[in-house]
Image (cartoon, rainbow, N blue to C red):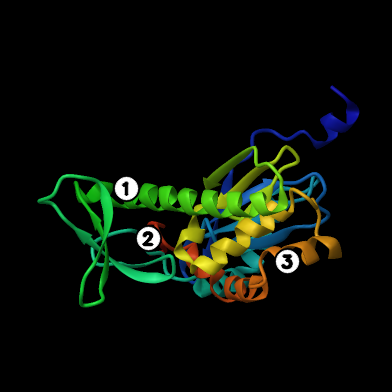
Amino acid sequence: MSLRALLYRRPTEPQSIDVVVDRSIVLVRVRRHRQARRYTLRIDAAAREVVLTIPPRGSLKEARDFAQKHGAWIAARLKRLPQATPFVQGVIVPLRGVSHRIVHRDDIRGTVWTEHHDAGECLICVAGDPPHHNRRIGDFLKREAKRDLDAASRRYAEQLGVSIKRISVRDQSSRWGSCSNSGVLSFSWRLILAPPFVLDYLAAHEVAHLVELNHSPRFWRLLKRLNPDCERAKAWLDTHGTDLHRYGMPVKADRAID
């Protein structure tokens, strides 16, 4: 083993530490990063957790003290997060930007489907036992996202005369979409919750990267030709994007100090 590796080697460290915030115990995820120069804190809105980055020579004790010192900052940022909203009976979910109420149909066989009533109400209907509803509705939304993103991406790819190797949909926490050097496009399934013009913009954005794998002026000009509505979509995501991460998330109970 090299001297450098020995220098930065650490015994097995815990993946998280407890920090007391407003008389409650908050779980803080810790990560050691070789390029970090100082201790830093951030809030992962998608996972609804606090992340503490430790520099290579940092200690767990200093990390805990740093997090504890910034307890007020942690509390303020956590309070700003939208309330977690699991997929359960009665919850309103914005499917393609349109409000849908979740309804349990225990007298009908099947999994998940949508209904539109003459009165104007839109429903997401789910069958089966309630403990499985959150997973089943999540799977349904991922399938819908895959279908819409596949269609939009291939439409834009045809316009540019480029090929897509594969399209994947998952729960990305740090970005809405990405494009690899090999032509694989990845998207967040939560785009199905946004209005269609937002999903369309992300599809156009990643397909444009198949031509310009950068964010140069040439890339933005190309994207503007593909999707003239891109500025409106970017503004919508800046305003409402964080809110999409709360859907399907279980409600976590704080551990209070007696």
Separation of marks 3 and 1 at Cα, in angstroms = 38 Å
Residue bearing the label numbered 1: 136
Residue at the location (43% across, 65% down)? 96
Quarter of the picture containing the N terminus is top right
x then y, percent, for residue 55 = 78, 50
Where is residue 15? Give x, y as percent.
59, 43
Is 238 rendered above or below residue 183?
below
Q: Nearer the viewer, mark 3 or mark 2?
A: 3
Q: Secondary structure at mark 1?
A: helix
- Mark sitting earlier along the chain (2/1): 1
Q: In the drawing, does residue 104 fall left or right of residue 157?
A: left
Q: Residue at x 58, y 76 (%)?
A: 239
Going by the numbered disc 1, the residue's amino acid type is: Arg
Tell me the tag on residue 251. 2
- Answer with mark 3 or mark 2, whichever residue precedes in sequence: 3
Residue at 67% x, 61% y: name it: 41
**Do the residues under discs 2 and 1 have CB atoms within 8 angstroms?**
no
Does 164 sit above or below residue 25?
above
Nearer the observer, disc 3 or disc 1? 3
